[in-house]
Amino acid sequence: MPGSAGRSGDPNPGRRRRRRRRTRLTTVKETSAGGLVVDPSRRHAVLIGRLDRHGHLLWSLPKGHIETGETTEQTAVREVKEETGISAHVLRKLGTIDYWFVAERRRVHKTVHHFLLEADGGELSDEDVEVTEVAWVPLAELESRLAYADERKLVRRAFEFLDADQEAD
């Protein structure tokens, strides 16, 4: 047909389309531990704030990578101290969260073991380079402050444990 542009309306029939090469991402597994740290009066909990790539402050529970030879409980205690400045001991396991994300051309499957911890001492500190802010937050405000739904669910579970402990006293 005169004036036709060729196949399917292609305005440049002589030019070949380039296919974008898909780069195959390496899949890796990462395991971390951390948790919800409550003060001895069990009225406040410590949260960390990190800036996302858009500059928004997102509040979450402290957590970090398990080092060789550590248990998940030991990691939770160490990471809480490193990220918040607060020394704490584990009261009980809260649960595990796992999720996927892509970073540095890798597809990461991350598993995070969470614990309910009680503060023993220390002072709030945001000296960890991964942390922008650290704060003691009233328990009643935790759910509205936390950025991630799966962490809010763990906090609700922690409240059930704390309520049961209070009733037992």
Image (cartoon, rainbow, N blue to C red):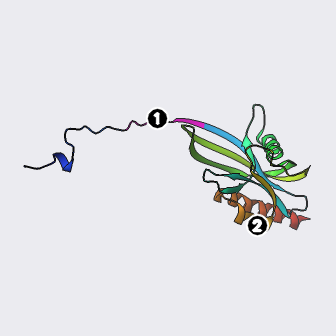
Main SS of the magenta part reads: loop
Give the residue at x 45% y 35%: 23
Q: Is residue 36 magenta?
A: no
Front residue (pair 147, 112): 147
Front residue (pair 72, 106): 106
Q: Which mark, residue 169?
A: none
Element marked by disc 2: helix
Give residue 169's position: percent from left, percent from top. Answer: 92, 65
- Whether 50 is drawn above or below 156: the answer is above
Q: Residue furthest top?
A: 68
Give residue 93's position: percent from left, percent from top. Answer: 77, 50
Q: Amino acid at mark 2?
A: Glu
Task: Look at mark 1 in the image and give the residue it sits on.
Answer: 24
Q: Amino acid at mark 1?
A: Arg
Task: Look at mark 2 in the image and give the residue it sits on.
Answer: 141
Residue 32: image quadrant is: top right
Q: Is residue 21 magenta?
A: yes
Side of 92 where 96 appears, left or right: left
- Whether 27 is drawn above or below 111: the answer is above
Front residue (pair 2, 99): 2
- Whether 121 is drawn above or below 138: the answer is above
Give the residue at x 68% y 49%: 96
- Whether 90 is drawn above or below 156: the answer is above
Per the model, the C-alpha gap separating discs 1 and 2 is 42 Å
Front residue (pair 9, 89): 9
N-terminal label among 1 and 2: 1
Stretch in magenta: 20-28
Q: Residue furthest left?
A: 2
Residue 37: image quadrant is: bottom right
Give residue 143's position: percent from left, percent from top. Answer: 71, 64
| Crowd tier of the residue under label 1, counting other residues whose Cα lies within 10 Å: few below 14, some 14–19, many 20 or above | few
Give the residue at x 78% y 41%: 75
